[in-house]
């Protein structure tokens, strides 16, 4: 993987590479398809359960953005950490966390990852190196930088993948973190998921610099804009960034240009964009359809793809079933886990 | 007439310092602005600049002299035409003092503490210290440094980060020498970026490292309070016990001297409101050491509230290989039967002075040093109140929703039938901290107010 071009100022700023990203093997295409489908079906089911009243509070769905986490995860190695904000279900599934545990947390049951005490926005898995799940916009950026600090301190060769949105990119602590990460050469990939809207505010209405790959320029952090709807482009960019970090060169920014099909949360009337806009992205750029079409063109049979679909549906249905039948946490759980 | 050069004050509250070095010899010509000597205190070294011209007539205080009081004549300068014979005519002290170079950063250079030892009329032996233990006299600053150094030697996962903690040796010299022993990997100077480095510390702690995050003062930690509360305090609960963080946030808290409203505030009540945090605020040098070591080892986030005014105070610290004071235990430092005075940190200064005064009037006060604010040692408070029937809380912070209010509520809930009078609170006045010396004094609690409150609850 080529290192990014160094600009005169010391920071590389690449636009999306022209042409197609490196091809996937059939096996990689199938993996990507399965992982993305799992997230989409899971989120659709979560939306249904929310409508039925089984999930409460805030619930932010990841539908449309699946290629970002799936492609990034394909670029990582064991021990690399992942941390993100509140739109986190996709990240958890991508890191291999169990669908039952995630869904049961959404319904606030004892079998949830946080025993029902965290909910949609606050889940963690030490085993899968998933560090949350954070409800305060931008807080995960400093925390993720701290994960990278720990990797650097231990010299373990791991990378922290710190996800945040175009909205969080305007928070002050993001830049405090950029400064320290570059100053100390911390191995952190800042993945800015630009889905074009921070809640209901379009990027153009909130951001003076709309090219998020340039947000690290004054810290000399290289950045790159990536087609976040193409899982192959994401994986390639992720590998480039990870190699940069693992070589001890410090942080790397990836702006993932993506789109969320659903509202900000379940109660979003979506008056800030047209139905046509959403339909156009779905029709032209859908990350899952892209993979499916490539597989069909490569003569993978409809039946094989349907089998994957069925397998994923079974996992999701089982998780919904578990999440509705698992008991609520014991009342005594109210008082546990405050201190250890 | 020869001009006297006086021992300068490097800060508004400095009372004495060491004359480290003379840079001019007797008989040398001096121009205004020349650096003539170096003065050091326990936290800083400063150059003394001449404000007069002439010849250095006589050095009155030789270099290497320690504890020279401010305004002591240290040398004489002869004006043109004067000779050593004129020295006899030099006026008594209170001529012009040489001026020290002003501190570069106001933020770093808050006033030095008063040098007087804290009143530590300890009547009760410390239960954590075995009888016959050898004691060493240390400043609180040194006790804190030793606590960190011992824990860093013991556990490679412990590191310290903050503004000016490494190369500058600590804004208040608390981290003095740590960089030299442990290196830049474990003693980390951060940019001025409280919110960011607090988050970095918490993130590192979530992986199992044990950061000591120094805030230059807790006033600046307001920039970081989201990470302290929303990330550090709540993660263990939100993760169902999977992921917590062992981290210490430490630094000076409470009223400093003459730095006005933004640099002089007590956050005891703020942090002690939060489940998931432990909050420690010691008074004695031994407790500073033993509790900081306990805080560093604690698997939970600990807010360790120090006090700038106390840093230079000395106390007896047990000379033990591993002296730990458990978090969550108050200490009765003076026993008495008529009224219970409850305080912590620098509030103890007022409480102990008041107890001395009250004794002269035949009122024997029992004085409790809470030491830990969360978890609060309700049992020790309640047992004392059951004995005395009366209680006064003493704090530098504001009364509304304060720690004193919490103590009063606990006494009411647990010892209502034993009370012979309503609990009284002595606190900081309900105003931002003023700058003017007289107003600042009025804004803080005083021993006299504690005496008055104690007498009121004793109906005397």
Image (tube, coloured by chain):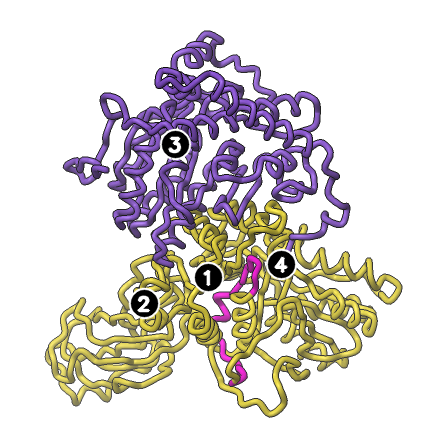
Chain colours: A purple, B yellow
Chain letter for mark 4, please: A
Spatial separation of the CA atoms under disc 3 and disc 4: 37 Å
Chain letter for mark 3, please: A
Name, please, the residue furthest toward the right: B417
Chain letter for mark 2, please: B
Spatial separation of the CA atoms under disc 1 and disc 3: 37 Å
Spatial separation of the CA atoms under disc 1 and disc 4: 18 Å
- Same subunit: marks 1 and 2: yes
Instruction: Check disc 1 and report the residue beneath it.
Output: B212
Query: Could you say which disc has been placed on residue A340 in the image?
Result: 4
The magenta span reads: B298-319
Q: Nearer the viewer, mark 3 or mark 4?
A: 3
Query: Could you say which disc has been placed on residue B183 in the image?
Result: 2
Instruction: Check disc 3 and report the residue beneath it.
Output: A71
Residue B272 visible somewhere in the drawing:
yes
Picture coordinates of residue B221 (x, y %)? 48, 52
């Amino acid at each position: 993987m080529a290192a990014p071009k160094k600009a005169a100022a010391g920071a590389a700023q690449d636009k999306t590479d022209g042409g197609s990203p490196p091809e996937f093997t059939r096996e990689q295409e199938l993996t990507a398809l399965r992982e993305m489908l799992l997230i989409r079906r899971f989120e659709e089911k979560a939306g249904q359960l929310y409508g039925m009243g089984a999930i409460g509070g805030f619930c932010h769905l990841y539908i449309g953005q699946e290629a970002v986490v799936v492609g990034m995860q394909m670029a990582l190695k064991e021990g690399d950490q992942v941390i993100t904000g509140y739109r986190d279900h996709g990240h958890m599934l991508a890191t291999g966390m169990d669908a039952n545990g995630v869904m049961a947390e959404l319904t606030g049951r004892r079998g949830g990852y946080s025993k029902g005490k965290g909910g949609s926005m606050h889940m963690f898995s030490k085993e899968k190196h998933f560090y949350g799940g954070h409800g305060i916009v931008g807080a995960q950026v400093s925390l993720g930088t701290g994960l990278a600090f720990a990797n650097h301190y231990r010299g373990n060769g791991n990378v922290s993948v710190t996800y945040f949105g175009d909205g969080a990119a305007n928070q002050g602590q993001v830049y405090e973190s950029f400064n320290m990460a570059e100053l100390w050469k911390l191995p952190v990939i800042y993945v800015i998921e630009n889905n074009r809207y921070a809640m209901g505010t379009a990027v153009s209405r909130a951001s003076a610099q709309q090219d998020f790959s340039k947000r690290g320029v004054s810290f000399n952090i290289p950045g790159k804009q990536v087609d976040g709807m193409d899982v192959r482009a994401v994986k390639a960019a992720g590998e480039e960034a990870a190699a940069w970090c693992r070589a001890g060169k410090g942080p790397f920014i990836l702006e993932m240009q993506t789109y969320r099909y659903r509202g900000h949360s379940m109660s979003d009337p979506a008056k800030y964009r047209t139905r046509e806009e959403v339909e156009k992205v779905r029709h032209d750029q859908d990350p899952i359809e892209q993979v499916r079409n490539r597989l069909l063109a490569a003569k993978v049979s409809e039946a094989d793809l349907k089998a994957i679909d069925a397998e994923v549906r079974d996992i999701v249905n089982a998780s919904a079933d578990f999440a509705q039948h698992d008991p609520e946490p014991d009342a005594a759980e109210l008082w546990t886990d405050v201190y250890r | 007439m020869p001009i006297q050069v006086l021992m300068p004050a490097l800060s508004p509250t400095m009372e004495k310092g060491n004359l480290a070095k003379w840079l001019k010899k007797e008989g040398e010509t001096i121009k205004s602005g020349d650096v003539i000597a170096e003065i050091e205190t326990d936290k800083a070294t400063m150059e003394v600049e001449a404000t007069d011209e002439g010849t250095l007539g006589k050095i009155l205080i030789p270099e290497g002299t320690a504890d020279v009081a401010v305004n002591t004549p240290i040398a004489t300068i002869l004006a043109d035409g004067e000779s050593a014979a004129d020295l006899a005519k030099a006026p008594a002290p209170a001529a012009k003092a040489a001026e020290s170079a002003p501190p570069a950063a106001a933020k770093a250079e808050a006033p030095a503490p008063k040098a007087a030892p804290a009143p530590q009329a300890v009547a009760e032996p410390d239960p954590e210290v075995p009888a016959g233990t050898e004691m060493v006299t240390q400043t609180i600053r040194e006790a804190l440094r030793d606590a960190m150094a011992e824990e860093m030697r013991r556990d490679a996962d412990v590191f310290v980060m903050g503004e000016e903690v490494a190369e500058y040796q600590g804004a208040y010299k608390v981290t003095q020498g740590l960089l030299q022993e442990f290196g830049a990997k474990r003693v980390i100077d951060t940019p001025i970026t409280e919110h960011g480095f607090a988050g970095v510390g918490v993130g590192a702690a979530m992986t199992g490292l044990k950061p000591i995050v120094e805030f230059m003062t807790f006033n600046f930690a307001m920039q970081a309070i989201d990470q302290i509360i929303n990330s550090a305090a709540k993660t263990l609960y939100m993760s169902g016990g999977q992921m917590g963080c062992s981290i210490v946030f430490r630094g000076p808290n409470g009223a400093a001297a003459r730095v006005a409203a933004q640099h002089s505030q007590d956050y005891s009540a703020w942090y002690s409101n939060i489940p998931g945090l432990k909050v420690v605020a010691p008074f004695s040098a031994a407790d500073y050491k033993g509790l900081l070591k306990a805080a560093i080892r604690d698997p939970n986030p600990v807010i360790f509230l120090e006090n700038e005014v106390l840093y230079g105070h000395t106390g007896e610290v047990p000379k033990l290989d591993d002296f730990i004071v458990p978090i969550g235990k108050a200490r009765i430092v003076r026993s008495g039967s008529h009224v219970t005075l409850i305080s912590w940190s620098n509030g103890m200064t007022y409480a102990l002075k008041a107890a001395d005064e009250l004794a002269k009037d035949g009122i024997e006060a029992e004085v409790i040093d809470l030491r830990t604010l969360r978890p609060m040692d309700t049992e020790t408070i309640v047992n004392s109140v059951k004995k005395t029937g009366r209680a006064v809380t003493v704090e530098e912070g504001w009364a509304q929703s304060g720690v004193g209010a919490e103590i009063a509520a606990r006494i009411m809930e647990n010892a209502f039938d034993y009370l012979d009078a309503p609990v009284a609170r002595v606190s900081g006045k309900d105003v931002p901290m003023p700058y003017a010396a007289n107003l600042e004094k009025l804004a803080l609690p005083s021993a006299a107010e504690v005496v008055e409150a104690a007498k009121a609850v004793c109906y005397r």
